[in-house]
Amino acid sequence: MATSTYAYKVRDKTGKLVVGQLEAESEQLLVAKLRQMGYTPIAIDEHRSEKLSREIQIPGLSNRIRLKDVAVFSRQFATMINSGLTLLRALYILAEQTESKPLAAIVNQVRIDVEKGSSLSGALGKHPKAFSRLYVSMVKAGEVGGALDSVLTRLADTIEKQVELRRKVKSAMTYPVVVGVLVAVIVSAMLLFVIPMFKGLYAELGGELPLPTTILINISSVCRQYWYFVFVVQIGIIVGLRRWITTEEGRKRWDAIKLKMPVMGVLVKKTALARFSRTLSALVRSGVPILESLDIVADTSGNSVVAAGILDAQAGVKQGEGLSERLANHDVFPPMVVQMMAVGEETGALDEMLDKIADFYDAEVEATVNALTSLIEPLLIVLMGSAVGGMVIALYLPMFNIIKLIE
């Protein structure tokens, strides 16, 4: 039977008037749902507005769900469950008050699935864009262990740490990207508009030009005459590189290259270790089985080199080895991480040790970002000066010999 949307007016247990909308297969079933939620129905009307379907949608933006929104949802959900609200009523309130419209729509669908008898983790698992495998697994463990509120709080903490980690990395990358774009714009403008003016001048004067000037003028001529070809080649390189990275072999090689980069490699490694430690700690503490936890951590590590080490450790655990034993064979995991995990396994406090590792690398990421920012700024200034200054010097080299050219 098809469901319809109904607008309703009800009073809660305190007598306060509540207005909202719900989907139901019939008006009678809606009344039963409202009474189950602790409301006293006053008026119910079938809602025929198609406003939601007519809203302007911006591809890639309108339906995007931010991690920050999921973290806020999780913390509010935990508070409501801890306060004694029923699961359905908490989901209904969250669907009404969540600021992110795409997330609110998903929460409403989750509520409908739970009403139909689905488990919360099962309903969340239908929406992987909003709720990751990590999220669903931890919620499932919370349902089984009867500690859903504490698991949701832990999820909120974990997601907030991830958001903060991403913010730090983005802050380190923003300045180089902006300067790089600026350099590209300046160089392109000089090649297309400035250098041709000098080319005409030097053609009138005659004489032999210095090699740097000749090379620069030839590059400018190629860019002006075959700009469309240069543009297509650049786009082709970018598209080809992106497609290569999406392949299994390409992803492995690219992730290995990122870890070995002279400046950014340290930041990439520390970020991956912080994410690995924080995620595994949250899963272990929530009661998710260790093999499943390792599978999830490998899937969410963000780096195939780190994932390979985790999967190798998982294979060792299946054979009865300790979690930290095989990690020592992978260079991406420093001896400190391996030793602290080994101590955590021996003392039965693996989650606490992983939290300490995550806190340490969070602080390391922040310190590295600050150091990189201080280091990158002068390097980029030198890069910009070299690119633009080199072109200017090449253009003005013939000026030093201007008298001979005129003669």
Image: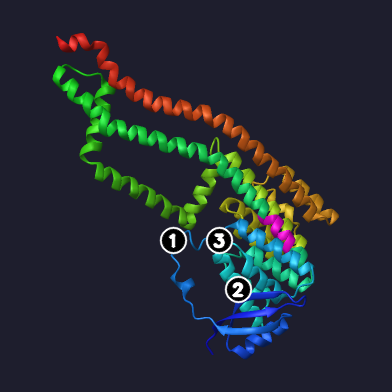
In this view of the protein, which residue sits in the foreground, 361 or 399? Answer: 399
Q: Which residues are magenta?
A: 152-159
Q: Position of residue 231 (x, y in %)?
A: 29, 45
Name the quarter where the N terminus is drawn. bottom right
The correct choice, above or below, for 333 with respect to 115 in the image is above
Tell me which residue sits at (20%, 39%) in the image. Answer: 225
Give the answer, above or below, for where 284 lies relative to 255.
below
Q: Earlier in the sequence, mark 2 or mark 1?
A: 1
N-term-proximal mark, 3 vs 1: 1
What kind of secondary structure does the magenta stretch mostly adopt? helix
Name the spot of residue 394 as percent of width and height, x first: 30, 21
Residue 65, which numbered label? 3
How would you rate the neighbour count of disc 2 (Cα within 10 Å): few for under 14, some for 14-19, many for 20 or more?
Answer: many
Q: Earlier in the sequence, mark 2 or mark 3?
A: 3
Residue 301, quarter of picture = bottom right
Residue 294 is labelled as: none
Q: Secondary structure at mark 2?
A: helix
- Is residue 367 shown to the viewer in this render? yes
Q: Nearer the viewer, mark 3 or mark 1?
A: 1
User: What's under tag 1, amino acid-wise?
Assistant: Ile
Q: Which mark is residue 108?
A: 2
- Residue in front for this viewpoint, 116 or 36: 36
